[in-house]
Image: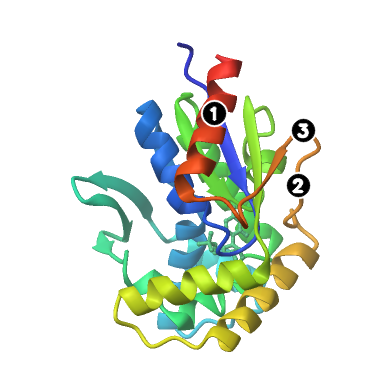
Amino acid sequence: NIPLAIAIDGPAAAGKSTVAKRVAHQLSYIYIDTGAMYRSLTLKAIQSGADLEKESELAVLLKATDIELIQKRDGQHVMMDGEDVSHDIRTNEVTSQVSIVAKHREVREEMVRRQQELVEERGVVMDGRDIGTHVIPDAEVKIFMIASVEERAERRHKENLEKGFTSDLEQLKMEIRKRDELDSKRETAPLVKAEDAIEVDTTSLTIEEVVSQIVTIVKKKQ
Ligand code: C5P
């Protein structure tokens, strides 16, 4: 079996990371969460009091920031400047501001450069917004995962409750719509389905069904 590159893009909370992790596991591929990289920079920018609208300020900050995705026995951990920020990058504060940081061209160029270094070898599943269009335009398998806003918000809501967090369904819907709008309307590498991507609507599918659809697509290409 020839190892391939699998690009999974789509709007917020469509289940990309859950599915990408399982597909990677089934194929013994490496999973790379590019959203975690934008989230890490956002966390650092907030902590250092940077102006999130200032492109050059953020570009300078990113140059001085080391972001590593490492595999541990209990899953992937995100290290920023040597510190484990896996939890801190998932707070509402970061989630609500990450799309502002991610809209800047200079930030994206550096992120894409780093991400491309990570896919020099095939055998990867990468998820994000611009993977099939910019990061791995020659990926052998491109998936564009979508689901209705209602479905995405409800899944996130359930997840929050299971984790013991308070969660407001209407608030979640608003936040997801807002983030999708910012990601889809930005000038640089907006969220858009690559021409050669396969659209998978997960609204009425289980995680297992989506995973097996993607694995089937991969097997056909090998
Ligand atoms: O995937 P996740 O929800 O963690 O991504 C967080 C945010 O990072 C997205 O809403 C988007 O603004 C940005 N992002 C991006 N390009 C990527 C991955 C994430 O712009 N490849």
Can you give x and y, in whole percent of width and height, for residue 100 in the image?
64, 74
Q: Image point 63% across, 43% down: which residue?
A: 131
Q: Residue under circle 3?
A: 196
Callout 2: few (<14), some (14-19), or many (20+) C-alpha neighbours within 10 Å?
Answer: many
> Dividing the picture into quarters, in which one does residue 51 lie?
bottom right
In the image, ligand 1 is in what quadrant? bottom right
Mark 1 / mark 2, whichever is N-terminal: 1
Q: Of the numbered discs in the image, which one, if any, rests on residue 40?
A: none
Q: Image point 70% across, 65% down: which residue?
A: 183
Choose between 59 and 155: the one closer to the eye. 155
Q: Residue under circle 2?
A: 193
Q: Residue under circle 1?
A: 5
- Kindly report the distance in space between the C-alpha atoms of the residues bearing marks 1 and 2: 17 Å
Can you give x and y, in whole percent of width and height, for residue 49 in the image?
47, 85
Q: Amino acid at mark 3?
A: Asp
Vertical placement of 7 versus 112: above or below? Answer: above
